[in-house]
Image (cartoon, rainbow, N blue to C red):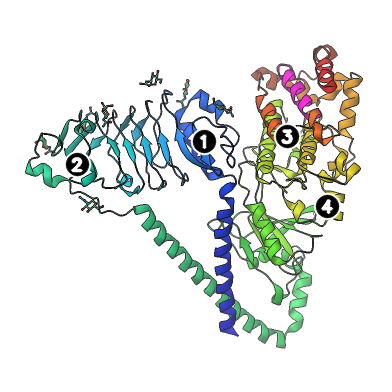
Amino acid sequence: MCSSKFFNYLLVIALLLLYQHATAEDSQDGFHGDERDTLLALKEGFNNSFLDGNWTGIQCYMNSTPNWYGIRCINGRVTGVSLENMGLVGKIKPDALVNLAELSILSFKNNSIHGNLMEFSYNPKLKKIYLSGNRFDGEIPSSLLGLNFLESLQLQENNLAGSIPGFNQSSLREFNVSYNNLSGKIPDTRILQSIGLSSFVGNQDLCGAPTPTACSSLNDSSDPPNSNKKNPFFSSTLVVVDVIVLVVLLIFFIIYYKKYKNLKKRMKRRNSVQVDEEKRDAITNNSMENSVPAGEEDRGKLVFFDKNGTHFELEDLLKASAEGLGKGNFGNCYKAMLEIGPAVVVKRLRDLKPLSSDEFVKYVHAIADKKHPNLFPPLAYYYSKDEKLLLYKYASNGNLYNRIHGERGTRDRVQFGWRSRLSVARGIARALEYLHLTIRSQTIAPHGNVKSSNVLLDENDEVLVTDYGLISLIALPIAAQRMVSYKSPEYQGFKKVSKKSDVWSYGCLLLELLTGRIATHSAPQEANGLDLCSWVNRAVREEWTAEIFDVEIAAQRSANHGMVRLMQIAMKCCEKSPEKRPEMAEVLREVEAIKVVVDSEDEEDLSLDQSITDDSLSASTPSMLIADERR
Ligand SMILES: *[C@@H]1O[C@H](CO)[C@@H](O)[C@H](O)[C@H]1NC(C)=O
Ligand SMILES: *[C@@H]1O[C@H](CO)[C@@H](O)[C@H](O)[C@H]1NC(C)=O
Ligand SMILES: *[C@@H]1O[C@H](CO)[C@@H](O)[C@H](O)[C@H]1NC(C)=O
Ligand SMILES: *[C@@H]1O[C@H](CO)[C@@H](O)[C@H](O)[C@H]1NC(C)=O
Ligand SMILES: *[C@@H]1O[C@H](CO)[C@@H](O)[C@H](O)[C@H]1NC(C)=O
Ligand SMILES: *[C@@H]1O[C@H](CO)[C@@H](O)[C@H](O)[C@H]1NC(C)=O
Ligand SMILES: *[C@@H]1O[C@H](CO)[C@@H](O)[C@H](O)[C@H]1NC(C)=O
């Protein structure tokens, strides 16, 4: 029995590895957040106002024309970065090209970038590198020798020093290092010797063929050619992968061994003091223990999506003290304080569709694979016959619902100004646009449950949208009762949801953000809501202008224009007919285009200037809103 069980573990590992590989392949045509992060970091370094305005949103999607200047893409992967003649300044970081594994063309021709050349081992497919006409210094990195497809390397007119490495890739056709500060012997490789002299001129101390200067013996021995070096990146990653697999196997073996011992102990114990366990269950009221069935036989495993992040075992979770976070939509939520590591939120999933464990795993992986700075992915899942859990990090600043409505009229209320609200509106729109781009189904709403209590705020008040994708897990009758998409006019009318249902939910959320009033369909049980869309429509028609906006922001006069603009966008999103609503990408563009114009005094004087005059708004508001409505 022992060996067959161990064999099962091995099988599971093998399957997991296969699965991981398969999903990695799958995501090739999807969106690559890591590549985006790399490009954004690159942009930060350049401090270029054009790029700052242009490199926003998603860099490229599938095979459509990239939105970002100078970026080329194939199948959603970045294959080219070409920023020439732009007057870029700044220092390049060694890992500037990390994650760009498909990169084939790189050009920073004719700028003013300085610093050592970057590391190229992340980009094994590079064919063309044009870095001429900058202020790069330091040595030519040997990682260039590992680029087996390199066709053209242009480094002329920089300030590179040291000797030339022994380039010997047979693919290399063009090579130019003229006008640098290179020295030493030009390596005696077939490729370098076939390149003409004009590629080497303008360096202080180069010698040997093809230059006319012979090297002194001292020069000759100073730099042994290192053309035999293998690509250090590949060999080292292979070793690392091997080690990781070994360690994982070892860990599994240890866990298995411990469990086996435990089981043996328990069997013994069970025979003697069977009552003990039942008692313990009854006593430990404030721990998770009694909320998760402890049926040893079908107890599953806690599976972490990020293999390198924090890990713990189900046992640790059971030992942790827990605090109820109230009844969620699809089962209760707990906050568990682990003895080691951060607090986590445990979401018990109830009322699921009848799913096999494989289907469940596939769905939760699809959820966890969505990577965007404004999405809050689960950390881990747990699956057994009787219990399905999703684990999340604990977001310290709570949710948007509490931020908008919490502690109103008390001393503890923290003002929630226009600038912060606009930034929240943007964050949510970015997250939704990303979900809409990456989930292509026509028949489900990619998020499905957009509402303020599903928008968390991290310690910097950055938006983290959560609860997305559960629409494919939850049984329809329950989902129809509890998920916001199913409250949309089209579901009420035609029993259909789509991407546009998310747009509608987003519009309602914007109205909540702007008016500070609670919407019926997303209100928690204890709160009374308002049909916000009709209320706002009525308010606009009947010109209760001053009453529309939350008093907390209405006083920020210089921002009134932006508020009106956001209100118009919200009302377009709330259109009854899905066809009339804009796509999420368009919504995002419009929300991003709203300018933050808030004088610092405005924010300060908030408490003093609560009295907003009707004139200030009626001059602009109703006509603009109504004009838009008529279209
Ligand atoms: C970025 O450029 C602007 C002018 O274009 C300059 O004022 C600012 O100091 C620069 N910032 C950094 C970090 O270099
Ligand atoms: C970036 O610039 C290019 C070319 O100027 C343009 O086609 C593209 O739409 C811009 N993208 C954004 C997001 O502004
Ligand atoms: C180099 O870039 C600058 C802009 O930074 C441009 O004015 C100049 O014409 C470019 N030179 C060449 C040779 O393209
Ligand atoms: C050229 O490189 C040498 C070191 O090899 C350095 O001492 C010198 O300052 C460099 N010259 C310039 C102009 O950067
Ligand atoms: C360069 O590579 C060729 C084969 O690709 C090999 O025959 C030759 O010896 C190498 N030369 C040097 C100097 O490494
Ligand atoms: C190398 O670059 C220099 C300076 O830009 C240029 O004059 C020369 O023609 C180039 N050589 C080749 C082979 O491209
Ligand atoms: C290498 O040889 C050149 C030409 O003979 C000479 O000018 C230079 O000083 C030598 N450099 C070193 C580092 O020995």
User: Is disc 3 placed on a helix, strand or loop?
Assistant: loop
Residue placed at 50% from the left, 70% from the top? Answer: 249
Q: Residues within 10 Å of mark 2 (few under 14, many from 20)?
A: some
Q: Quadrant of ligand 6?
A: top left
Labels 4 & 1 near each other (Cβ < 8 A): no
Looking at the magenta stretch, what is its main secondary structure? Answer: helix
Indicate which disc, 4 or 1, sits on the residue closer to the N terminus: 1
- Spatial CA span between label 4 and label 1: 38 Å
> Which amino acid lies under the numbered mark 1 shown in the image of this protein?
Leu
Residue under numbered circle 4: 479
Any magenta on residue 580?
no
Residue under numbered circle 1: 40
Indicate which disc, 2 or 3, sits on the residue closer to the N terminus: 2
Residue under numbered circle 2: 193
Q: Quadrant of the C terminus?
A: top right
- Spatial CA span between label 1 and label 3: 25 Å
Between marks 2 and 1 in the image, the one whose residue lies nearer the viewer: 2
User: Is disc 4 placed on a helix, strand or loop?
Assistant: helix
Residue placed at 38% from the left, 57% from the top? Answer: 236
Labels 2 & 3 near each other (Cβ < 8 A): no
Residue placed at 78% from the left, 25% from the top? Answer: 567
Give residue 533's quadrant in the image: top right
Q: Residues within 10 Å of mark 3 (few under 14, many from 20)?
A: some
